[in-house]
Image (spheres, coloured by chain):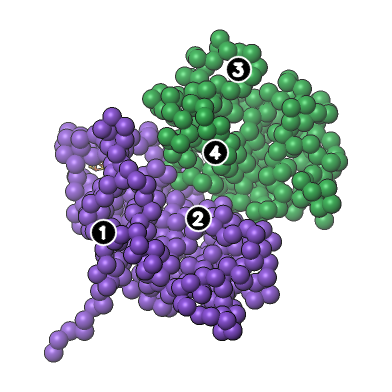
């Protein structure tokens, strides 16, 4: 289970963008969270991905109450959640070749030896040609870079995936392709999904259930 | 009796090609042989995936290509000026903002963060129309009004605006010079659906009412459907289909297999991706660039490049 209780979070203590949010996801469930831009849904996605410490409230992940966020999150929990953001260019170190970008989480968790084989397998799953792996971010398109970011998110076989506007910059075909990769991964592993976005048609087609921002926050 | 003269196109692009010189004498063929024309009042949506060359085409029209770019062909405005041949001085003084208005991709990034919308509008009005105080204030307010930007928000900074108002501020700036051609580069990226519709409706109104022409570059097919009279689909640097929007989105639908696949990928349709990946623009195959992904590909497709005839570039359409 993934549970958020009464989460208040933001970047300005006096004006938190998230106020009193509640959310529950059962294992294997996919939930689409709809909301207008600027409503705070991206901040909430970062809380779920354990990247942002809320000011108030509790996050419970598979029975563990999360006490540390970002670099303070315990490794066992951090690796349980994979996350993909809207803008691959802001989420990728421009100096890294795609191969190393995808391998980042494996290296960070001491699985160097596995990395080479695993990166090849991941690249194939997300539809990233082997020749692209030696390129750096500026040498590939947004769509190709987002494929690499998705591969990175799947590298540690997370039990939960958070996709924050993953396809907002992408064309229809790349969107459908990346959603298919996520769904194929979930079919094989039973991972749960929180997909955050602003397009009801897309999230309605993608997710088992959708909810609106207004329904999960207080007032 | 002589028939009424049809007005000349606002923009007429012929065989426009852009290639980038790379190290080791390689070339990347970003745009090849693009040909289309825009009539007064017409909106054309240029669609395709990221990396297909559509943004390079836009940059070429504005003279904003990097130094290693080589262009061929022509892109003429109604008065005969060829945007590809014009020097930087001409482009800066008489084209950008004056003959071609740019509606940017990310208004938040395009607007200067430390200055109010009023001060940015006044500066642009002054620069493009020569209006001086005391008339400047009213002129800037009129410019805001044209894009439905509320006067009550003129003294705000860009970060104090909603996404929709920031987009209107950017549109107001693009309209100041009364340019006959508007170029909108992914103007709806990251906007909510309601806002996408409103933004494109407004752009369309500015185009129709004043006999301008609009070239909108987008990956968003819903935005394209809402705004376009004509749709051009780009694949691997070429326009592979150009057709009236009603036929494209309605019946009989797209004729090029890639265009069909792209439309079918929408979540309101089959939600199935076009299989495979586009070829590298630096290593295009000899025949049709879509052959490796096309279910209808045969020997002819793999050896001969299909020309754009009758609005579609496909041997078997
Ligand atoms: S020319 Fe051949 S390969 Fe290319 S789109 Fe047409 S049928 Fe497919």
Per the model, the C-alpha gap separating discs 3 and 4 is 20 Å
Residue A154 vs A202, above or below: the answer is: above
Which chain letter matches label 4? A
Per the model, the C-alpha gap separating discs 2 and 1 is 25 Å
Label 3 residue near ligand 1, CB within 8 Å: no
Tell me if label 2 and label 1 are in contact, CB under 8 Å. no
Q: Which residue is at a point 28% across and 57% down the rendered structure image?
A: B84
Residue A69 vs B197, above or below: the answer is: above
Residue A80, percent across and down? 69, 24
Per the model, the C-alpha gap separating discs 4 and 2 is 16 Å
Residue on which the image places disc 3: A107
Residue B66, percent across and down? 37, 47
Q: Secondary structure at mark 1?
A: loop
Q: Secondary structure at mark 4?
A: helix
> Mark 3 vs mark 4: which is more N-terminal?
4
Residue on which the image places disc 2: B105
Q: How many marks?
A: 4
> Mark 2 vs mark 1: which is more N-terminal?
1
> Viewed as shown, does residue A216 lie left or right of B277?
right
> Viewed as shown, does residue A66 lie left or right of B17?
right
The numbered dot on residue A88 is 4
Rendered shade, chain B = purple
| Label 2 Cα neighbours within 10 Å, binned few <14 / some 14-19 / many ≥20 | some
Which chain letter matches label 1? B
Residue on which the image places disc 1: B85
Residue occupying the far left of the picture = B1
In the image, the chain rendered in green is A
Q: Are marks 1 and 4 on the same chain?
A: no
Please say whether residue B214 is visible from this viewpoint: no
């Amino acid at each position: 289970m993934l549970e958020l209780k009464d989460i208040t979070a933001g970047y300005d203590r006096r004006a938190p963008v998230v106020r009193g949010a509640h959310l529950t996801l059962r294992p294997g469930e996919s939930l689409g969270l709809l909301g207008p831009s600027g409503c705070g849904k991206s901040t909430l996605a970062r809380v779920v991905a354990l990247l942002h410490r809320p000011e108030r409230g509790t996050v419970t992940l598979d029975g563990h109450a999360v006490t540390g966020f970002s670099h303070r999150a315990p490794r066992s929990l951090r690796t349980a959640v994979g996350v993909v953001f809207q803008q691959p260019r802001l989420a990728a170190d421009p100096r890294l070749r795609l191969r190393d970008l995808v391998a980042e989480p494996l290296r960070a968790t001491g699985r160097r030896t596995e990395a080479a084989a695993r990166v090849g397998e991941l690249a194939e799953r997300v539809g990233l040609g082997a020749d692209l792996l030696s390129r750096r971010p500026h040498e590939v398109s947004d769509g190709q870079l987002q494929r690499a970011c998705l591969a990175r998110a799947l590298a540690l076989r997370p039990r939960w995936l958070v996709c924050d506007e993953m396809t907002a910059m992408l064309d229809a075909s790349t969107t459908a392709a990346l959603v298919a990769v996520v769904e194929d991964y979930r079919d094989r592993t039973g991972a749960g999904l929180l997909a955050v976005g602003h397009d009801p048609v897309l999230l309605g087609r993608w997710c088992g259930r959708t909810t609106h921002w207004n329904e999960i926050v207080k007032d | 009796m002589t028939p009424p003269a049809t007005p000349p196109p606002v923009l007429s692009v012929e065989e426009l090609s852009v290639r980038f010189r790379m190290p080791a004498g390689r070339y990347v063929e970003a745009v090849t042989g693009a040909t289309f024309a825009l009539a007064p009042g017409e909106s054309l949506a240029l669609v395709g995936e990221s990396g297909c060359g559509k943004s390079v085409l836009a940059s070429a029209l504005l003279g904003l290509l990097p130094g290693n770019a080589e262009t061929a062909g022509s892109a003429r405005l109604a008065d005969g000026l060829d945007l590809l041949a014009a020097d930087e001085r001409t482009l800066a003084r008489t084209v950008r903002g004056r003959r071609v208005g740019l509606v940017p991709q990310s208004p938040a990034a395009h607007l200067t963060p430390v200055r109010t919308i009023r001060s940015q509008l006044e500066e642009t009005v002054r620069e493009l129309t020569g209006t001086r105080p005391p008339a400047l204030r009213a002129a800037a307010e009129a410019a805001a009004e044209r894009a439905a930007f509320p006067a009550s928000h003129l003294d705000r900074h860009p970060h104090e605006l909603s996404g929709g108002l920031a987009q209107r501020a950017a549109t107001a700036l693009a309209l100041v010079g009364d340019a006959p051609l508007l170029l909108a580069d992914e103007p709806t990226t990251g906007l909510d659906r309601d806002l996408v519709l409103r933004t494109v409706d407004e752009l369309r109104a500015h185009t129709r009412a004043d006999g301008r022409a609009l070239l909108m570059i987008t990956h968003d097919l819903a935005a394209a459907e809402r705004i376009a009279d004509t749709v051009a689909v780009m694949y691997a640097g070429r326009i592979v289909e150009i057709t009236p929007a009603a036929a494209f989105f309605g019946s009989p639908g797209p004729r090029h297999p890639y265009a069909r696949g792209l439309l079918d990928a929408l979540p309101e349709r089959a939600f199935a991706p076009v299989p495979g990946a586009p070829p590298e623009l630096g290593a295009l195959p000899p025949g049709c660039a879509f052959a490796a992904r096309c279910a209808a590909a045969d020997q002819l497709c793999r050896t001969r490049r299909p020309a754009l005839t009758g609005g579609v570039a496909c041997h078997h359409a």
